[in-house]
Image: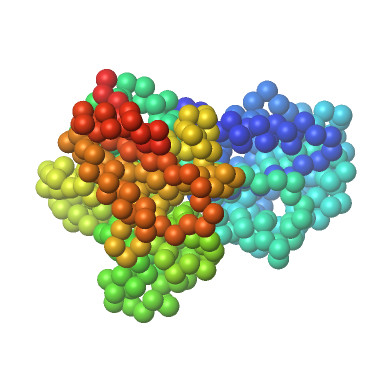
Amino acid sequence: MKKFVDREVELQFLESQFSQNGPALVVIYGRRRVGKTALIKQFIKNKKAIYFLATEEVESQNINNFKSLVAKFFNNSLLEKIQNITWEEIFEFITANIESEKIIIVIDEFQYLCKVNPSFASILQKIWDERLKEKNVFLILCGSLINMMEQQVLNYSSPLYGRRTGQIKLKPLKFKYLKEFFPQATEDELIWLYAILGGVPKYLEVFNYKGDIFESIRENILNKQSFLYEEPLFLLEREIQDIGTYFSLIKSISMGNHKLHQIAQNLSVHQTRLTKYINTLIDLDMLRREIPVTEEYPEKSKKGLYFINDNFLNFWFKFVYPFKEQLELDNVEFVLENIKRKIVTEHISYVYEDVCREYALELSNRSELPLKVSKIGRWWDKNDEIDIVGIDQTSGSILYGECKYTNAKVDIDLFYSLKQKVSKVNLKNKTKEYYIIFSKSGFTERFLNFANEMKNLILINFPKRS
């Protein structure tokens, strides 16, 4: 079942662009399956709009398809009959027939038009400059191939550079919206589902969850006929060439190699050979580079670590891809048993930290913390790591935290361990320090009593047991 969830900020932005007098040109882009088309269709409901989905067919076929849509929109049978028409002529017809009410023109999968005709961006630039920019029209260009969208529309070298009035890079949904897809799931089950699927709406829609997480993994991911079984393969094939190198790189990171030299050593290649591949995967939102949140100049930091920027991709490369031979031989039980043994320690516990950071930021935004966190992340050095460091850049106050996804109650020793690590954090102009501890299984009586006496310590039992 398709659901439209969240995207309030993006819809408000599109509405603000639509309500302004005169023309608007907005670019919507992001990775595949993230919900770009769903956002557009939600926005254009009950508005005068021409929605055109480009294909990888020859340009003449795309022109004919667009012409038919325009003819139907204006109820003009003569336009429908015209042969060998050009893009310019169709837009000339549109501008000649626009009345006072603003109309929306959507070109979805815009990158396909640029693939079949590399000069299409120049053609559209001319159309915009000579026809559309003086009209009451809202043009939306939407695409999935992030590199191509940036080159053809957003970059300085693009013919369309400087024409756009705004852009949206659509991201996956946050954890807090998963309840919309799985209303019967408990908070703990939602953490598992988020760890396995991430926040990509398409994955959440197709995952048939009936209350047993491992049976659902078997049915929806390990089943050779399921949509998700080879999804990462299809995803990467559409975006890049030399897929083998990229697969090896992502697999290496999924195995716990997060430093550049570790990845290079694991793949037996020189570090310099990896830079191009890593940058491409970062551009595609499949990898991210993390640095300690306290770094003053992040772009110059040598402490960068690389992580898979999608929970489903991470899960798939850890637990599915290395066992494809077993799955092809229908040895599903072997693969499932491996998942059961390792998923908590090697996957869920790390995603739990991400969810807790998101939760801490949300508490801050709701003014439920004693500081206003404007920057949040992790901190680490050669020996230690702190799960949560939130910085109030206005007051200089700092929030330090730990996240424990274990079956044992957390005791006071964790707080003293955290304090010891905090003493090694070098932060300029810091004022007050606050502490936050997240625990799946709650806290000992001793720790709860201690926290009651401490004004700068917050204990959160998350997820709460129902």
> Where's residue 23, x and y in %?
81, 41
Q: Which residue occupies 77% across, 52% down?
A: 163
> Where's residue 81, x and y in %?
75, 39
Is residue 102 visible in this depiction of the protein?
A: yes
Please tell me which residue lies in front, 111 or 402: 402
Q: Which residue occupies 32% across, 65% down?
A: 382
Horizontal placement of 89 versus 117: left or right? right
Q: How many marks can you see? A: 0
Q: Which residue occupies 73% across, 33% down?
A: 16
Determine the image quadrant of residue 206: top left
Q: Which residue occupies 26% across, 24% down?
A: 465
Horizontal placement of 18 versus 414: left or right? right
Which quarter of the rendering shows the C terminus? top left
Which quarter of the rendering shows the N terminus? top left
Please tell me which residue lies in front, 227 or 75: 227
Determine the image quadrant of residue 446: top left
> Where's residue 459, x and y in %?
33, 33
